[in-house]
Image: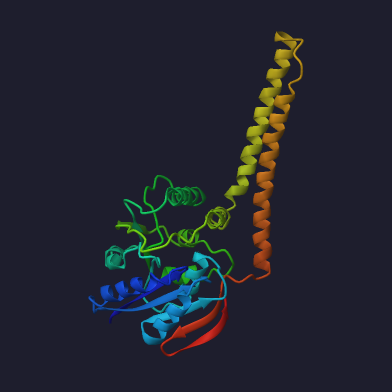
Amino acid sequence: MNRKLSFVIPCYRSENTVMTVVDEIENTVSQRPEYEYEIILVNDGSPDNVWNVISERAKADGKVIGINLSKNFGQHSALMAGYNNVSGDIVVSLDDDGQTPACDVFKLIDELDKGYDIVYAQYPETRQSWFRRLGSNFTKKITEYLFDIKGDNRKGSSYFVAKRYLVDEMVKYKNAYPYLAGLVLRSTRNISVVDIEHRNRIEGQSGYSINKLLALWLNGFTAFSIKPLKLGTYCGFFLAALGFVYAMVTVIRKLFITPMMEAGWSSIISIMLVIGGVVLIMLGLMGEYIGRIYICINKSPQYVIKDFVTKMGGKNETVK
């Protein structure tokens, strides 16, 4: 019995690139007749004409499924919308800009067949701006800290293949703000990577603005762990110890070294600013957690499907 591959591609500002990716997928998989496949294209509220491009291809090509979200929910929510509609044995995630080479997908699948649950493409040399590279490294460090991953030099990416059972487990998460790395790591640590060439973007630039990257980092920092809240305790102990030591030094200097020493307003203000800054940071983190609880209680949707198009027809208005 042939195995089936489900390709899931979130689309944003890619009306001139996504069909190049689709063509490469179809050319690659057609050379392996033992595999069936489907390609799920998720329009994440893109302001360009990409939905028309997707829907026209889906109506003409029985291998392509088009999903149109009602607004921009973010890359991870768009992927979850695709994952909820896969039918394959192996799920493949990749980008819509041509930087993730679909022609190398069987390198990842061959590694998956060695017994791993998920295999990421790892780029020895990335074709990204310094800001995106900084963001990727920061995200990796956050993940290592939150999930107690020590000494692992492997780097994940948006290009990966996963077994269907893992994706089925991931989509059980129904709340807003999904974070894929967290969803993977709470289910398995049986992970591998394969070195893949990272291409130049066909055209345009990344859809991740500074604001979106900051939101992604904050989401990763608070999604599946309470460790950030523990930072308040650590900072509190550190500042209390520092304040005690400073007070002792001040008393000793006043009594035995410089009795005429005047009170140092600058040092007092500095200490107040440090303590006040730490308090505000921790209040912000607590507010973020409380806000997420409020959103979850109110059942804010992870995504809303406005249109669903296949060659056989479509359906509308699905909320998850």
Taking the image as shown, residue 7 lies to the left or right of residue 309, namely: left
* Depth order, front residue of 52/256: 52
Q: Quadrant of the N terminus?
A: bottom left
The residue depicted at 65 percent of the width and 45 percent of the height is 281
* Depth order, front residue of 75/18: 18
| Figure quadrant of residue 100 | bottom left
Residue 313 visible, this orientation = yes
Residue 164 visible, this orientation = no
The residue depicted at 49 percent of the width and 72 percent of the height is 48
The residue depicted at 49 percent of the width and 60 percent of the height is 186
Q: Is residue 169 above or below residue 269?
A: below
The residue depicted at 42 percent of the width and 81 percent of the height is 65
Q: Is residue 244 above or below residue 73?
A: above
Q: How far across and down, in percent of the image, does residue 315 sit?
A: 52, 86
Q: How far across and down, in percent of the image, does residue 206 sit?
A: 45, 59
Q: Is residue 121 above or below residue 266?
A: below
Taking the image as shown, residue 78 lies to the left or right of residue 31, namely: right
Taking the image as shown, residue 69 lies to the left or right of residue 130, namely: right
Q: Quadrant of the C terminus?
A: bottom right
Q: Is residue 199 above or below residue 146?
A: below
Q: How is the image coloured?
A: rainbow
Q: How far across and down, in percent of the image, does residue 307 sit?
A: 52, 82
| Figure quadrant of residue 235 | top right
* Depth order, front residue of 184/215: 215
